[in-house]
Image (tube, grey):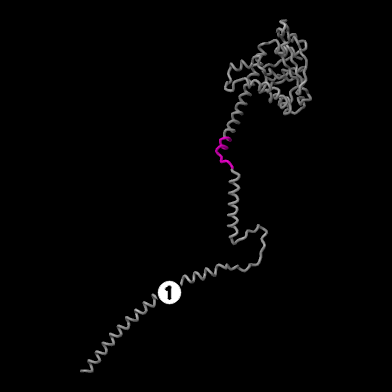
Amino acid sequence: LLLDDNEDVVDPGIWEETDEGSVLRASTDWVEHRDPHGLEKFEPSRNVEISLMYESSNISGGADSFMQVSAILPIIHSPFYSLLEIIDPNCQPSATLVGLIASSLAPIYTAFIILSKSGPSENEDSLIDALATHIPVIVFRYGLDRTRFPSRPHMSSFRPSSASALRNGLFRSPETLLSLRYEAAERFLHWREIERAVESIHTSNREIAHHFLEKAPSWDKAKWEAEWESRLSHDVATRSRENTVTNRPGNVIHRPAAPSIVDPLHFSSLIAFSLSLFNPAKARIMSSVSTFMRSISDCRVRMAMVGSFCIGVGVGWMLR
């Protein structure tokens, strides 16, 4: 369709089989150079590359749109990554950068052409919507009046109505070709900004994760094992001294109460405590006895004085 009866093509080249389909490298000009002997030699420039997708490669009209996109996008993005390595990451999008990428020397595809014999379909619309932001998409419906079908958003501004218009626009119209190249360059820069944003997010996440890992204390296996054994021994000893037994819920077994076990150390403790009370009890008793004796002594003196008084009174009475 593009090369047959095309006077602008000086060498059509040959189709080369690839995993994705076939590739044809045609030439619209000759390249002059000299061989080691100084003789002039002309070779085709191979400045036109056409990639053809096989219908058996999940690119047929009835195939799932997701399978189509997953097969086509890697081919479109392949030169994107090559160009991404050349451009300075700090270079911001500008008119100058767009002009450089739009040149014929930049290794990006100019357009993606869909050849169709029928009207639009849901599968075709899905394919166009998925690819239109990555490459200028041209839909050519041969055998039909293309003007009857509306264009999808973000499609290329170049909309040929015939095969001759398609060939003339790609091979004989520098304005049309330059417009397509600018559209392709803009889509590459759009993809590049998305990749830069995603990489920036991933870098930030990695830095945050690395920061937390640096601040987090390192795990010492030997220290953990020592602490585990010490804590386990302490918990076992504490639990063994408790007077309760934990039973599993729903599986409690009631047993008759066992007689309490007498601690043999209890007797010695009781005797020692009883003996320790002897000295305070003895001192208290002695204090009580001393008080009692003093009271009796005082009572005897008073009784003796009263008795003497009575005797004196009696003797005086008798002498009278």
Position of residue 207 in the picture relative to residue 151 (left or right): left
Q: Residue furthest left?
A: 320
Can you give x and y, in whole percent of width and height, for residue 188 in the image? 64, 21
Residue 155 figure quarter: top right
Count of numbered marks: 1
Residue drawn where x is 37% and y is 79% of the image: 292
Between 179 and 46, the residue placed more toward the observer is 46
**Is disc 1 placed on a helix, strand or loop?**
helix
Residue range (magenta) = 209-219
Residue drawn where x is 28% and y is 86% of the image: 306
Secondary structure that dominates the magenta span: helix
Can you give x and y, in whole percent of width and height, for residue 87 in the image? 61, 20
> If the image is split into quadrants, where does the C terminus sit?
bottom left
Q: Say above or below: 202 vs 297.
A: above
Residue 134 figure quarter: top right
Between 14 and 2, the residue placed more toward the observer is 14
Can you give x and y, in whole percent of width and height, for residue 137 in the image? 69, 20
Q: Residues within 10 Å of mark 1 (few under 14, many from 20)?
A: few
* Residue 17 counted in the magenta span: no
Which residue position is annotated with label 1? 282
Identified by mark 1, the residue type is: Lys
Can you give x and y, in whole percent of width and height, for residue 179 in the image? 65, 15
> If the image is split into quadrants, where does the N terminus sit?
top right
Q: Residue furthest right?
A: 56
Q: Say above or below: 106 vs 127.
A: above
Residue drawn where x is 39% and y is 76% of the image: 288
